[in-house]
Image: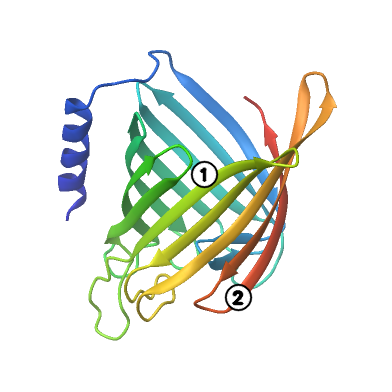
């Protein structure tokens, strides 16, 4: 599916769906400092800072997220992800542009075979005690090395938030349904089993510092990661 076709479908769904969001423009600015960068069962970097800026209006949201490595380990790269999404009720639809400088360092370079961009469409639904999401890469860099064909790499995830012993917890399970060089899998694979705990540490009456820790297992690669970090929020 081409990018233009996906955008048309997204906007059509948004047009026929009742809007339940507030009319005012909202925004947020924050940055996470992490001991390691782990994403969907893959370790993509070591210690770093991950800023995020977002604005939202009437259910639409536009956000920019980045990873800036603070170490000099080989393979650590700068990353910028841009997300456009629409939310109504518990349903969220969106498109993500993932880019990093591990390949071609030019951001505005979209040659099919060696661009640093991967474009993903996703749908998610929040049931309350449990949320589910499906993501598929439909354009950009996502090819199988053995035959050179587009892989349409996909990922399915379940998340369950809960509160226990004064902390906010989140349990996550994720899988890749078919072979994908993008996720380093050869077929159906469970790549994510994680448990994350977050605790707000009160500094003053008007400022608290969220600390978090996450134990992250990838059964497919038999890897286990432990990540710690803190979040600074401007608004």
Task: Answer with the quarter of the image where residue 90 lies.
Answer: top left
Which residue is the extreme one toward the top? 23
Q: Residue at x 31, y 58 (%)?
A: 136
In terms of depth relative to the viewer, which is nearer, 210 or 119?
210
Asked if marks 1 and 2 touch (Cβ < 8 Å), the reply is: no
Image spot of residue 139 (x, y percent): 26, 59
Q: Is residue 94 above or below residue 226?
A: above
Which numbered tag is attached to residue 87? none
In terms of depth relative to the viewer, which is nearer, 15 or 145?
15
Q: Is residue 225 above or below residue 23?
A: below
Image spot of residue 95 (x, y percent): 32, 45
Which numbered tag is attached to residue 65? 1
Q: Give the mark count.
A: 2
Pick whichever of labels 1 and 2 is earlier in the sequence: 1
Left or right: 142, with 231 as reference point: left
Task: Answer with the quarter of the image where residue 88 lies.
Answer: top left
The residue where tag 2 is placed is 223
* Residue 108 seen in the figure: no
Q: Residue at x 68, y 70 (%)?
A: 73
Left or right: 52, with 8 as reference point: right
In terms of depth relative to the viewer, which is nearer, 81 or 87?
87
Quadrant where the C terminus is found in the figure = top right
Left or right: 217, with 124 as reference point: right
Q: Residue at x 57, y 79 (%)?
A: 222
- Give the SS element for disc 1: strand
- Give the SS element for disc 2: strand
Image spot of residue 171 (x, y percent): 57, 53
């Amino acid at each position: 599916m081409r990018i233009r076709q996906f955008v048309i479908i997204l906007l059509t769904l948004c047009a026929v769906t009742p809007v339940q969001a507030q009319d005012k423009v909202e925004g947020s600015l924050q940055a996470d400092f992490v001991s390691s960068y782990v994403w969907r069962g893959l370790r993509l970097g070591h210690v770093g800072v991950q800023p995020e800026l977002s604005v939202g209006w009437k259910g639409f949201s536009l956000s920019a997220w980045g990873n800036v490595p603070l170490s000099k380990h080989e393979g650590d790269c700068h990353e910028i992800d841009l997300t456009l999404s629409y939310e109504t009720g518990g349903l969220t639809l969106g498109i993500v542009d993932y880019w990093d400088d591990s390949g071609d360092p030019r951001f505005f370079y979209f040659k099919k075979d060696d661009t640093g961009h991967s474009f993903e469409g996703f749908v998610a639904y929040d049931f309350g005690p449990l949320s589910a999401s499906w993501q598929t890469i439909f354009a950009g860099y996502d090819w199988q090395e053995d035959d050179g064909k587009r892989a349409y790499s996909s990922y399915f995830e379940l998340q369950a938030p809960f509160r226990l012993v004064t902390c906010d917890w989140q349990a996550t399970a994720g899988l890749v349904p078919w072979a994908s060089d993008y996720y380093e899998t050869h077929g159906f694979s469970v790549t994510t089993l994680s448990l994350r705990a977050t605790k707000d540490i009160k500094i003053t009456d008007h400022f608290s510092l969220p600390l978090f820790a996450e134990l992250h297992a990838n059964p497919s690669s038999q890897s286990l990661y432990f990540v710690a970090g803190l979040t600074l929020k401007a608004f």
